[in-house]
Structure formats: structure tokens, C-alpha cells
Image (cartoon, helix red, strand yellow):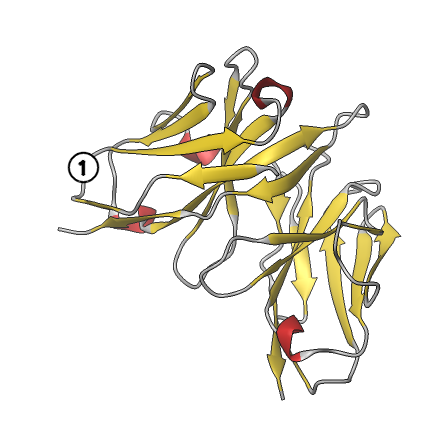
Amino acid sequence: QVQLLQSGAEAKKPGASVRISCKASGYSFTHYQIHWVRQAPGQGLECMGVIDPSGGTTDYAQKFQGRVTMSRDTSTNTVSLDLSSLRSEDTAMYFCARGAVYTSGWTLLDSWGQGSLVTVSS
Amino acid sequence: EIVLTQSPATLSLSPGESATLSCRASQSVSNHLAWYQQKRGQPPRLLIYEASIRAAGIPATFRGSGSGTDFTLTISSLEPDDFAVYYCHQGSSWPLTFGQGTRLEIK
């Protein structure tokens, strides 16, 4: 079955960087996108960006451009999210989600990782 | 960016009652709209996609409808396990966006 296994919780100081990983299994890794979605405590869901594991192409939400980098390792079926210049507002649960792209171009996030909590505090 | 507006923010109902949740898009998303259920400490769970198609394992008590800009999720005969937060989500155009959520709570 499809599984996205994320790395554990991280505690960082303001200004630091964090890397979160998402290991995929149970499907063909290069046939689906991986999206990153974050959720601040008690808040809603916010899309950060997407990576196509096939070619490594990325697209980032404007809010995060310049601070976020997504990468993939096809030898381990793992996608990573790097977020730099952390501030307290980046404290959130970060989810990876598999994105299925249909022929008409729309995307469905059909499976999710369990989430990785990032806490930013001095 | 397509903005999704959900209403109501909170819905208080009793088990056995029916719930009607709404999602309005700032521009047409055709039928490329999904609904997710999220419980505390868990990732979102896909319920409905393409506005009205139930995901695998989702009971028939969950029904999605709508197209264009107006969508509805109806949950009939509420079970205690159904009380959670529900999000609508559009996959029609980048950036993908979510509604702010509707909290379904026990009355």
C-alpha cells in the first residue's frame, strides 16, 4: 500500500534551517508528484510547493520562494524539504502528500505522510 | 490564486443528524474539488474528489456535489467518528489552495 514516511520532530532556533524528509513506498515513485503542505497550530492547510520526482522540477508558492528548496533522491525514493531563515511563524506541522496529475491537468493529493512537527523558538 | 471560502466555520450537531458543509471558490474550478477530513494529530484523509466521487473506503453517508464555484459536502446520519474538521481543496490551478475548514462538533 502507498506509504509516505516522514522524519521526526525538529526544534530549531530563529535564523536556522531545517530539513524534513519524506520516504515513499508502495507505488512507482517517479509517476507522482510530492507536495508539501504545512499547518500552523490550530490553523488551516497551506501549500508550500511541489516536486516532480521524475525530473526533479519544482514549483514553490510565492510566499516561500527564496527560503524553500525541495529535492529528491530516486535511489531511496525520498523527497526532502529544506526551509531556511526560520522564524517563529514557521512553527507548524509539515506534511508531504502524493499528487496524482490527471490528463486534464488537475491534481489530487491522495495520500499523506504522518507529518513532521517543526518548532522554532529561541 | 483561487480562494476557497467554507461555511459555516463551526457546525454543532447531534449524532444521527445530517450535516451540510459549503465551499465557494473565487473562480471556477470545474469539478476539480476535493474534501478532506482531519482529526486532531492526524493528517488529512481524502473523502471526496472530482466534487462527487467517494475515495476508497469512504461510506455512502458522505456525499459531495457541485461544480464551478459552489460545492457541498453532505454527511447523513452523523456518527461520533464523523466529528472532525473538514477542508475543501482545489486542484484545478496553481497554487493549490484549501478552504479554512469547517469544524463539525457534537452538540
Q: Position of residue A90 (x, y in %)?
A: 32, 46
Please report the residue visible at 44 percent of the width from the left and 39 percent of the height from the top: A5
Of residue A76 and residue B18, the one placed in the foreground of this image is: A76
User: Left or right of A64: which side holds B70?
Assistant: right
Residue underneath mark 1: A15
Identify the image quadrant of residue A85: top left
Q: Residue furthest left?
A: A122
**Viewer can see residue B37:** yes
Q: Position of residue A59 (x, y in %)?
A: 52, 23
Q: Amino acid at mark 1?
A: Gly
- The number of numbered badges drawn on the structure is 1
**Viewer can see residue B94:** no
Give above or below for B19 relative to A84.
below
Q: Position of residue A98 (x, y in %)?
A: 59, 34
User: Left or right of A29: which side holds B18?
Assistant: right
Quadrant that contains the N terminus of chain A: top right
What is the crowding at mark 1: few (fewer than 14 residues within 10 Å), some, or many (at least 20)?
few
Please report the residue visible at 36 percent of the width from the left and 25 percent of the height from the top: A66
